[in-house]
Image: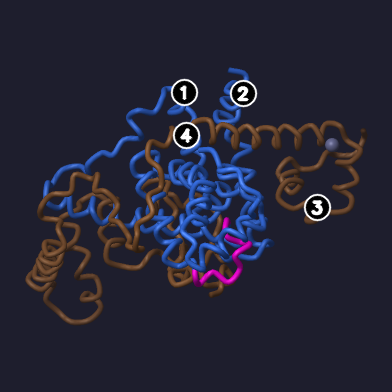
Chain colours: A blue, B brown
Amino acid sequence: MQAIPTRDTDGDLARRAAQGDRMAFGVLADRFSGRIFAMLYARTRRRMDAEDLTQEVFIRALEKLHRLREPDRFGPWLFSIAVNAHRDHWRRKKATEVFSLAWRKKSPVASPPEAEEKVVSRQFWDRVHVLAKRLSATEREIFFLRFVDDLSIREVAEILGKSESAVKTHLYRALNKFRGETSLRDWLKGDGES
Amino acid sequence: MKENHVDPRRLAWMIADPDRLDPGETRHIAQCPQCRARVHELEEDLARLSLAARRHVPDVTVRVRLPATATRPRVRDRFNLPVLASAPALALAAALVLVLTVVFRPVGPGLQDVNTVAPALSAYAPDPEMAEALSLADADLPGEYLDMVDITDGDSFQEFFEFAAPLPEEDLTGGRLKKGGFPC
Ligand SMILES: [Zn+2]
C-alpha cells in the first residue's frame, strides 16, 4: 500500500485528526493500513480476517484519538490497538469454536491458512509458525513486532507497555530460538535468491 | 586466535542489547572474525525474515473505510457459526452447562466441589484442547498473559491453539495497555 506523499508528520496529522480533521485521519489510514494489515495477516494468515481487523483498528483509533496524549507516537499507539484487536479476535474465535463444536459434536471447523496463499508464501509462513510455537507468548509477540513487523525496540516497549530492558531480555531468548530454526533460516537464504 | 570464542547464545546480545555483554566478550568479538561472522549471519537472516514477511503478504483488496460517525463494525463471521451460537443461544448453552453441573455434581462435601465444573465441561470436550478452549471462553486468560515481565521462559505453546498471542487485559487509552503504554 502506497503512503500518500505529504510533508506532514504522523504527529501533525494525528493532532489535526484529533481536532476533527477527517482528511488528516484518512492520510494516516493510507499511510499505516498496509503495515497494520501485514501485521495482522502474519498473525491470522487469513486475508479477509486481516482486512476486517485492519478496518476495526482504524475505527477504534478514530474513536480514541482524542485521548492520545502524544500524537507524535501515533504509530506505536496504532500498533498497540492492533495487538489488542488481534487478541480480542483470538478470544472471539476460540469462543465461537467452542460452541460450534459443542453443537456439532465434531472437530472444530478447520480454518486453514489462507487458501489463496501461494505455495512459496505458505512455505514461508508454515516455517515462521513453527518458530512461533517454540516461543513463549511474550517472546512471540516481541519477536514478531521487532523482526516481522519491523518496529524498533523502543516502539515494541511502548506498544506492550513494557520497559526496554524487559523487551531486550525476551528478545534475546527469542533470538536464540530463531538461531536454532535451521529450516526457516535455510529457507530464508534460498528465498532471497529466488 | 587462541582464546575461546564467545558462547553462540551470548552472541545474540549483540543484536538484543550489546551492553549486556561482558567487556571481555565485547573485546573478543571486536577482534574475532568468526564471532563477528556468526553475528552477521544472524543479522542477515533477521533482515531476510523482515523482507520475506513483507513479500509474502497478499495484496489488500479493500481500502480502509471511515464511517461518518465512529461506530465499530463487527468482524465478519467466518467460522461457520451455527445458529445456536447467537448471543441468546450462548446464554442458553451457559445455563445448560450450569444445570448439568448442578445435576451431576458429586455427592459429598469438601474440596470435591471445587472441580465440579470440569467434568461437566469435559462432557462436551473430551480432548484437552477443547477443555482448555472452554475454560478460556469463560475464565480470564492464564496468568502468563497478565504479567509479561515475570513470564517464565520455555515452550508454553500448549497453552495456545495457534500462533495467536493474547495480551494483558489492560487499558489502552480507554481500552487496554495502561502500564506505561499510552497514558491518556
Ligand atoms: Zn570468536
**Residue A45 percent across, percent down from the top left:** 40, 39
What span is colored magenta in the figure?
A66-75
Disc 1 from disc 4: Cα separation: 11 Å
Name the main secondary structure of what is drawn in magenta.
helix
Disc 3 from disc 4: Cα separation: 36 Å
**Residue type indicated by callout 4:** Val
Disc 2 from disc 3: Cα separation: 31 Å
**Residue type indicated by callout 3:** Leu
Mark 4: few, some, or many residues within 10 Å (few <14, many ≥20)? Answer: many
**Residue type indicated by callout 1:** Val
Residue farthest to the left? B103
For residue B57, the mark is 4
Element on which disc 2 rests: helix
**Residue type indicated by callout 2:** Gly
Query: Which residue occupies the foreground of this view, A124 or A114?
Result: A114
Mark 1: few, some, or many residues within 10 Å (few <14, many ≥20)? Answer: few
Task: Give me the residue at 51% from left, 39% from top.
Answer: A131
Residue carrying label 2: A192
Is there CB contact under 8 Å for labels 1 and 2? no
- Using the rendered view, name the quadrant where residue A156 is placed: bottom right
Is there CB contact under 8 Å for labels 2 and 3? no
- Residue B151, compared with residue B49, is above or below; it is below
How many labels sit on residues? 4
Query: Which residue occupies the foreground of this view, B116 or A117?
Result: A117
Judge left or right: residue A165 versus residue A186.
right
- Chain for numbered disc 3: B
Judge left or right: residue B16 versus residue B21.
left
Residue carrying label 3: B21
- Chain for numbered disc 1: A
